[in-house]
Image (spheres, grey):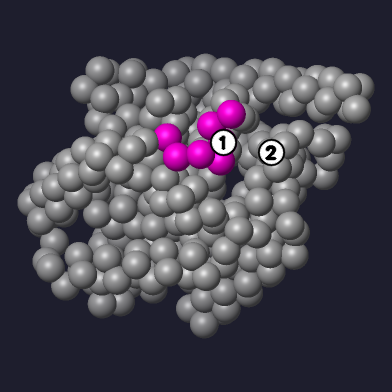
Amino acid sequence: MAVLLVAPFLTELLSGNLPASVFFRPQVFLCLATIGYGFPIVLLREFAVRRGLGLAGFFLLGLVYGIFNEGIIAKTFYLAIDVPIRNFDGYGFAGGVAIPWAITISIWHAFHSFIYPVVLVGYFFPEHRQSPWLTRRALLWLAVPTIVAGALVFFLPGNGRPAEGPLLFILMLAVACLLGWLAIKLGSRPALGGLERLRSRAFFLGGLAFVLFLFVPIVMAGVKTPLAAFYGYIVLLLILMLHLLRRRAALSINNVLLFAVGDDVLLALLGLTGAIAVGGLERIASNAGFLLLFGGFWLRLRKAAADTALSR
């Protein structure tokens, strides 16, 4: 399935978390495409489709994936120091959890690891967009190794992370279940529709989403903004976003992807700027390649939208 391959590219490689020389090692990529990203994303996508969820519900399920990735597999939620983005070191750490970091990175994963890859695959394979991909037996074959591997990684030390205790595991499961229940309550709005006229504002809204959901929280954490202000900002932002989404009956798939391009282009530009500053040739080449890829995809979206308009 294409989503097994797309999700790691739009996260680990695009973010620069893994350089290309590491990312493309067979054992690393196999792990990312299966237990790390592919299997849990497919399972959540199947849940969303079988429940008839809209993009608002998809977002909440994306948060569930963020919990799986960072709270179960990578275990970065439990770092008081040496958080992947150092601005969050010691910021809001309570009850064994770096709460502001957990919120911020889960939102990032909701977009980049779940919504964008699933919508992209639906764009290229429209006949399978609204239908389940797997039988119930196949779902079981994916769920069992995902759950077992996740539990083993969580409860055993490895990759520089200590073993964690059962209370934190139960907490992660409880929050994930709550998010899944809320996703069901949100229902089918907005549905993912077909192609329509490409709206350039979607590109700029994607860039704005990057700033509001990632850049601003990083800055707030860096200057140690009072936690009440941080949490209030995130809650208001999420309420506003979900309210705006729920007002729409449907969103066209090409404009959702243009939104994703706006988000990812800004991320690639920042990565390219940082790589140039430190002279990282591998990261320069990687980010430049992503920018060319996004530019080509934008041209494809524009052509497809024009062809659709002519055919009507």
Viewer can see residue 233: no
Q: Which residue is mark 2?
A: 253
Could you give the CA–CA distance between mark 2 and mark 1, rounded to whole angstroms? 10 Å
**Disc nearer the start of the sequence (2/1):** 1
Q: Residue at x 39, y 21 (%)?
A: 20
Q: Which residue is mark 1?
A: 129
Query: Picture coordinates of residue 138 (x, y %)?
Result: 27, 36
- State the SS at label 2: helix
Which amino acid does the dot numbered 2 rest on?
Answer: Ile
Which is nearer the eye, 242 or 137? 137
Query: Picture coordinates of residue 75 (x, y %)?
Result: 25, 54
Which amino acid does the dot numbered 1 rest on?
Answer: Arg
Above or below, 264 relative to 284:
below
Which is nearer the eye, 257 or 214? 257
The part of the chain drawn in magenta is 127-133
Side of 228 where 93 appears, left or right: left
Q: Quarter-wise, where is residue 266 in the image? A: top right
- State the SS at label 1: loop
Q: Residue at x 26, y 25 (%)?
A: 30
Which is nearer the eye, 276 or 286? 286
Query: Magenta stretch containing residue 256, yes or no?
Result: no
> Which labelled disc corresponds to residue 18?
none
Q: Residue at x 53, y 45 (%)?
A: 115
Query: Picture coordinates of residue 165 (x, y %)?
Result: 11, 66
Q: Are marks 2 and 1 in contact (CB under 8 Å)?
A: yes
Q: Crowdedness of circle 2 by 10 Å Cα count: few (<14), some, many (20+)?
A: many
Viewer can see residue 20: yes
Above or below, 4 relative to 20:
below
Q: Residue furthest left?
A: 156
